[in-house]
């Protein structure tokens, strides 16, 4: 089985991933993200999807379904190329909730 490789985000991000052979969706709307990922779910496709931070809707039903299913579709959130220092991923938020703010302090 082939795995689709998809990048969704700003021009710089999608251009960079295109050099690696990824399908690119430049400046997608929330509806585009839902449509593309929903299509992957409906078609039973395997995929690796890179989403630029802030692109995906926070209350996305299809992203929640992907996370529940696990495995077949892998979604990785990446920082915006224009503001990498402003990125806070879902894992970081989880660590802060579970272990407290001191868990991420530099020592």
Image: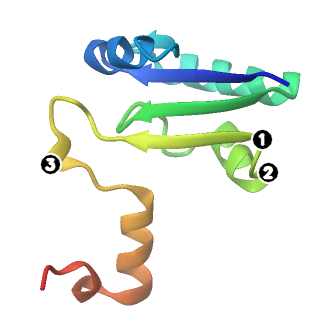
* Residue at (12% x, 86% y) in the render: 107
Q: Where residue 31 appears, x then y in whole percent?
A: 56, 19
79 shown above or below 70: above
The residue at the point 76 percent across, 20 percent down is 39
Q: CA distance from mark 3 to mark 1?
A: 30 Å
Element carrying mark 1: loop
Residue 29 picture location, percent across and down:
46, 17
**Residue drawn at the location 52% of the way across and 13% of the way down:** 21
Q: Residue at x 14, y 48 (%)?
A: 85
Residue beneath disc 3: 85
Asked if one can make out residue 95 in the rendered structure from this viewpoint, the answer is yes
Label 2 sits on a secondary structure element that is: helix
Q: Earlier in the sequence, mark 3 or mark 2?
A: 2
- Residue named by callout 1: 72
* SS category of the residue bearing label 3: helix
Q: Is residue 60 visible?
A: no
Would you identify the image quadrant in which residue 43 lies?
top right
Instruction: Determine whether label 1 and label 2 are within 8 Å by CB.
Output: yes
Quick check: 9 left or right of 35?
Answer: left
Mark 1, residues whose alpha carbon is within 10 Å: few (<14), some, or many (≥20)? some
Colouring method of the image: rainbow
Seen from the viewer's position, the closer of residues 35 and 76 is 76
Q: Position of residue 62 (x, y in %)?
A: 69, 37
| Residue that label 2 marks | 69
Q: Residues within 10 Å of mark 3 (few under 14, many from 20)?
A: few
């Amino acid at each position: 089985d082939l795995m689709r490789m998809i990048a969704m985000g700003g021009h710089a991000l999608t251009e960079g991933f295109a050099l690696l052979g990824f399908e690119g969706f430049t400046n997608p709307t929330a509806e585009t993200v839902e449509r593309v990922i929903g299509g992957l779910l409906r078609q039973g496709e395997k995929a690796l999807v890179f989403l630029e931070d802030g692109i995906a809707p926070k209350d996305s039903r299809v992203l929640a379904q992907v996370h529940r299913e696990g495995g077949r579709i892998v979604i990785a959130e990446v920082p915006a190329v224009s503001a990498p220092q402003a990125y806070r991923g879902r894992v970081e938020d989880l660590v802060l909730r579970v272990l407290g703010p001191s868990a991420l302090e530099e020592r």
